[in-house]
Image (cartoon, rainbow, N blue to C red):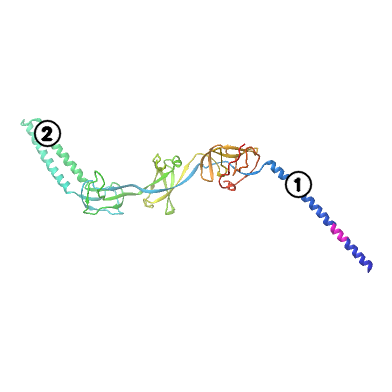
Amino acid sequence: MTERSAGQKRTVRLIGIGILVVCVIAVVVLVVVRHRGTAREARARQQAAQRGPMVPVAIVKPGPQQRTLVVSAETVPYASITLYAKVSGYLREIRVDKGDRVLKDDLLAVIYSPELENQYRAALVDAENKRRFAERERQLLKDGIISRQEAENASTDARSAEQTALALKRQRDYLVLRAPFDGTVTARYADPGALLQSAATGQSGALAIVTLSNLDRLRVYAYLDQKSASQVKLGDRCVVTDATRPDRKYPATVSRISGQLDPRTRTMLVEFDFPNTPQRVIAGSYVQVTLDLAQPPYLQIPASALFVIKEKSSVAVVGADNRIAFRPVTVADSDGKLVSLSEGVAQGERVVLNPGTGMTEGILVQPTLAGETGAAATGAAASRPRAR
C-alpha cells in the first residue's frame, strides 16, 4: 500500500510539472506573438505616416448639358377684351350672358340712340336737298345764267353733306355690337335699358357691356431670373402642370420672350402658348412650368471641396504623386450640393473633400475615393487651409 501511494504521488507530481511546463510555454509563445504583432503594427503605422494622412477625395466630372427649371406661372386668355359703347345711348337688347360661347361676328348687343337717329335722318334730307340744288346749279351754268364759281360751290356743299350723312351712318353701325373673335363671354355688366356713355374719348365713367375671352388657347406668363433668362430660346418645349391637379400635365412651347429684364424685379417675362381645347385649365389659375434649359458643359465637384484663400475660391487637388496643390477656381453655378466650375480644374482630377486647417500645400496624402456626390463629406466647406 505504501509503495502504491508513493507511486501515485509521483504520478500526480509529474502531471503537475507537465501542466506547468505547458503553461509556461504557452505564455512565452503568446508574448512572442504579441510582440511580433505590435512590431508589425508599429511598422505599418510608420509606413502609413510616411505616405501621409488619409483624405477623402472626389473625381472632377463633367456636368449635365441641360438643367431642369421649375417656375410658378399664371394662365391668361389668349385674347380678352371688354366691349364698351362708342356711341352714347340706351342698351336696347343684349343677347348673351356669362358663360355663353359665341362665334366671330355674332350679335352681342344693340344700342338705341335717339339723338344719333335724328341727326342721321336730318343729314340724309340735307344731303338729298343739296344734291338736287347742285344739279339745278349745273343746269343753270350750262344755260349761262350763273357763274362757274356758284355751280362749284353748290357741288362742294352737296359732297360735304353726303360725307356728313356717311359719317353718321358709320356711327349708327356702332349701335350694333358683334363678337370680334370666337370666344366665351366671361363677364356681363349691363342690362337692357341701361344708359351707356360713349367710351370713344375715355373709359372712365363709361359702363362696360361684356367681356369676351378666348379660352380655347391660353397664354402662360412666367418670370425667369437673369441666369435662366439667358438660356431660354424660342421654341423650347416645356410641361405645364396644374397646381391643383399635379397629375395633369400638358405640353407647351416658348412662344414669346420679352428680351428685357424688369428693372424692379430683375426677371424677364416669357410666354408659353398652351392649347386648351377642351378647356382643361381655368384661365387665371396658377400653374407650374417645367423647362429643360441647355447650359455650358461645366465641370462639377462637391460643394464641400470648395474653400477660400485670399478671397479667392480654391480647391485642394491631389496630383499624380499624391501631393496637395492649392488651385484657384472660377465658380459658374452652385445648387448647394454640387459646384459647377468654368475654369481651374480638369476632368478626372481628384479634389479633397472638407480640407482641414492642418492641410498645407505640397504635403503627401493617401487619397480615398468618396461617394459620387461626396456623401462622405457633406456639410459646409471647411476652414481655410494653410498655404506655404
Residues drawn in magenta? 14-20
Q: Residues within 10 Å of mark 1 (few under 14, many from 20)?
A: few
> Mark 2 to mark 1: distance in Å?
131 Å
| Residue drawn at x 14%, y 45% as measured from the top left | 121
Which amino acid type is shown beneath numbered disc 1? Ala
Which amino acid type is shown beneath numbered disc 2? Asn
- Residue 348 seen in this snapshot: no
Where does residue 291 sit, x and y in percent of width and height?
Answer: 45, 45
| Residue drawn at x 41%, y 50% as measured from the top left | 287
Q: Quadrant of residue 135?
A: top left
User: For residue 17: magenta?
Assistant: yes
Numbered mark located on residue 153 in the image: 2
Residue at the disc numbered 1 = 39
Where does residue 65 sit, x and y in percent of width and height?
Answer: 51, 41
> Which mark is nearer the camera, 2 or 1?
1
Quadrant including the N terminus: bottom right
